[in-house]
Amino acid sequence: MTRFLPFAALFACALSALAHAGPSVYLEDLTWTEVRDAVHGGKTTIIVPVGGTEQNGPHMVLGKHNVRVHVLAGRIAAALGNALVAPVVAYVPEGPVNPPTAHMRFPGTITVPVDAFEKVLESAARGFRLHGFKDVVFIGDHGGYGKSLREVAARLDREWAATSVRAHAIDEYYRAGDAEFAQLLRAKGYSQAEIGTHAGLADTSLALAIDPSLVREDRLGAPNRGPADGVHGDPKRASAELGRLGVDLVVDRTVAAIRKATARR
């Protein structure tokens, strides 16, 4: 016979699990005094995760990049042990509105001018410096704004040259989830045409590994119209199992890159 715990016992178990989980690494989950104490206690690296709100084919939600970078940044921060995670930057450059190009041709995609995007990152970084963080780390789940992340980090470093605070654009994050993951999948026998570059096998598998609700699995077997539907690749054989290989790559490579970039010489 199945035994059910009374509500009080279930509630106690839940509280115990939360207590053992420890404080969240996500800035927005904390109070200001908890952030202050975390920084004073050595959590002086702040990860700024950059996502993007864009079409991802008929089978994947517009917020894929935002969810993915939020979850992965949390795992990276937990592995580092000395980092917190800022809220995701979800409004990014996606091209012009008039005339619309690239993803802007698909309903729901959001774009902002490059200069506005970069100013948001710079302003946020200056605030983090004010509040005691020593390393501001930008990671991007979308390849289109990598140049902006690097240029913002370089400008901030010039501005902060006389201080001990530094900004870092960690290219390894995107590279691991893109080129390195594709290489791993090719070694397993998948073709580059299937792996794709956007909303294909690799991209969709990563999303399934992070949160299956990001993917409309009933659409994976639908006829693939390719770029006409915003898909570059073939997601039919995507799986969470494959995606977890990519997740491990991203976390491992990014943790190593951040440790190297933030090592004080």
Image (cartoon, rainbow, N blue to C red):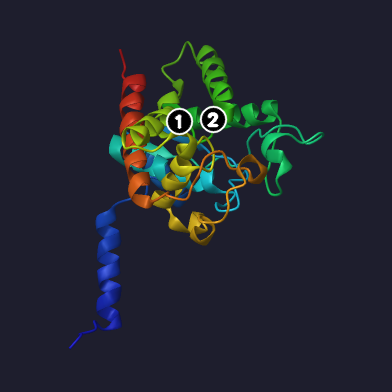
- Residue 40 appears in the rendering: no
Measured as percent of width and height from the top left, residue 132 is found at 43, 30
Q: Within 10 angstroms of label 1, few (less than 14), some, or many (20 or more) residues?
A: many
The label on residue 143 is: 2
Is 48 placed left or right of 186 in the picture?
A: right
Q: Quadrant of residue 180?
A: top left
Please tell me whether mark 2 sits on a helix, a strand or a loop. Answer: helix
The answer to whether marks 1 and 2 mark residues whose Cβ atoms lie closer than 8 Å is yes
Q: What residue is pinned by disc 1?
A: 174
Q: Residue at x 81, y 34 (%)?
A: 99
Q: Quadrant of the N terminus?
A: bottom left
Residue 171 drawn at (x, y percent): 45, 24
Q: Residue furthest bottom?
A: 1
- x, y percentage for residue 13? 25, 70
Q: What residue is rendered at 69% in x and 25% in y?
A: 115
Choose between 248 and 225: the one closer to the eye: 225
Identity of the residue drawn at 69% across and 30% down: 116
Q: Quadrant of the C terminus?
A: top left
Residue 112 horizontal/vertical position (percent): 70, 35
